[in-house]
Amino acid sequence: MNKNLTLVARIEANADTVELVKAELLKLVAPTLEEAGCMQYDLHQDNENSALFLFYENWENRELWQQHMNSTHLAGFIKATEGALKSFTCNEMTRLP
């Protein structure tokens, strides 16, 4: 059985904080790609709604992703964007054969 974990994180900024949120999301990419277990960490911005961002992530396993969730750079993002997000959802996914 495949123990890899795929995550789809949907982040929507408030209309007046799009550039702040985008800058803070971009800061997450390099350090996250260096984390143990991170196989893919792609950031996307919607072509029609610039306030909508999506991370497509692949991790070796859930435990290593949980370490990412407790990282200092993610804590910094949460602090820097406090009150700037309209919504945030994260779906844990399993790839089907």
Image (cartoon, helix red, strand yellow):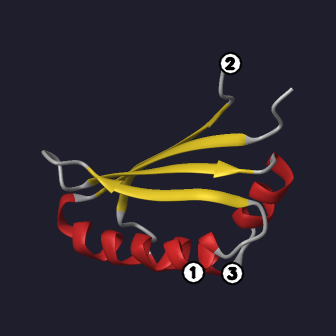
Q: Which residue is mark 3?
A: 72
Would you call the spot at circle 1 few (<14 residues within 10 Å), some (14-19), or many (20 or more)? few
From the viewer's side, name the closer residue of 9 and 82.
Answer: 9
Q: Which residue is mark 1?
A: 76
Comparing labels 3 and 2, the label whose residue is closer to the camera: 2
State the CA–CA distance, disc 2 to disc 1: 37 Å
**Dot 3 amino acid type:** Thr
Image location (x, y in percent) of residue 84:
35, 66
Whether residues under marks 1 and 3 lie with C-beta atoms below 8 angstroms apart, the answer is yes
Residue furthest toward the front?
97
**Dot 1 amino acid type:** Gly
Q: What residue lies at 34% left-to-right and 70% top-to-bottom?
A: 21
Choose top left, top right, bottom left or bottom right for residue 23.
bottom left
Q: Earlier in the sequence, mark 3 or mark 2?
A: 3
**Dot 2 amino acid type:** Pro
Q: SS of the residue at dot 3?
A: helix
Residue furthest toward the left?
48
